[in-house]
Amino acid sequence: MTGGGHAADLALAGIVLLGSCVQWLTGMGFALVAVPALILLLGPSEGVVLANCAAGAISVVGLAGGWRRVRPAAMVPLCAAAACTVPAGAWLTHRLPAPALLLVMGGLVTVAVLLIMRGARVPALRGTRGAVVAGAAGGFMNTAAGVGGPPISLYAVNAGWTIREFVPNAQFYGVVVNAFSVTANGLPDLSAPRWASVTAAMTVGALIGRGLAGRLPEPRARLLVLGLALAGGVTAVGKGLWGL
């Protein structure tokens, strides 16, 4: 393997490790942090499907200890709406050229992060109607851009959920919507050694994230995740514009 190949493998493992770490810290940080970097490293299509696989796997493990706090009344409309828009996201991913996809993905991440930073209050994101709107947006964004969490975060803000309420429900949604997305987009085309390094990075990231969860104040962790996500989104937009 060439030096460039080794560097790419190390970069991939580092991205996944960081994403896994912040996912365990905040409940939904993997895609925001990792997707912009993954699409720059692997290309839009492969980056998205790898993010879907990794985020889904992390959500499954995280949900094991908190499934009793899942709210079915909110999750049913959220997940049902996501199932309806996943095909549209998959269609977009396979039709747009790479620079346009980078632009779309980076733009979605950037706008979503700015809205979350503002704590946007949106009347349309309240109640059952809000769950349908957020779920539909999340399903489309997750399959098209690998980032389905921001609409759910905004829904939770408008529903007044605490972080304790948000995390297990976000993980449940992550399991379901990423399963939909992987079914629609397929699995990433990675070699066995790369799969092994990705799995190891996810495990190490989870251990670090769980270790930091009790030590890093929630506002600081949240600001770190959003700052990294915003930087990645802006970078993806810039590369997309350059490619066009």
Image: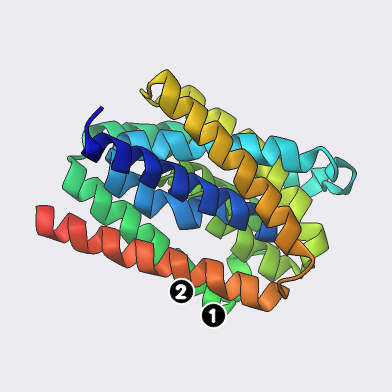
Image side of residue 96 versus residue 178, left or right: left
**Can you give x and y, in whole percent of width and height, for residue 159 in the image?**
73, 66
Q: Amino acid at mark 2?
A: Leu
* Vertical side of 92 occupied by 105: above or below: below
State the image quarter where residue 162 is shown: bottom right
Q: Which residue is mark 2?
A: 114
SS assignment at label 2: helix
Using the image, tell me which numbered label, if any, was put on residue 210.
none
**Can you give x and y, in whole percent of width and height, for residue 200 in the image?**
57, 35
- Mark 2 vs mark 1, CA separation in Å: 6 Å
Q: Which residue is mark 1?
A: 118
SS assignment at label 1: helix
* Vertical side of 107 occupied by 12: above or below: above
From the viewer's side, name the closer residue of 94 and 20.
Answer: 20
State the image quarter where residue 184 is shown: top left
Image side of residue 30 versus residue 184, left or right: right
CB of mark 2 within 8 Å of CB of mark 1? yes
Image side of residue 69 versus residue 138, left or right: right
Q: Tell which residue pokes out farthest to the bottom in this image.
A: 118
Q: Tell which residue pokes out farthest to the top in this image.
A: 192
From the viewer's side, name the closer residue of 31 and 205.
Answer: 205
Crowdedness near tag 1: few (<14), some (14–19) or many (≥20) residues, C-alpha within 10 Å: few
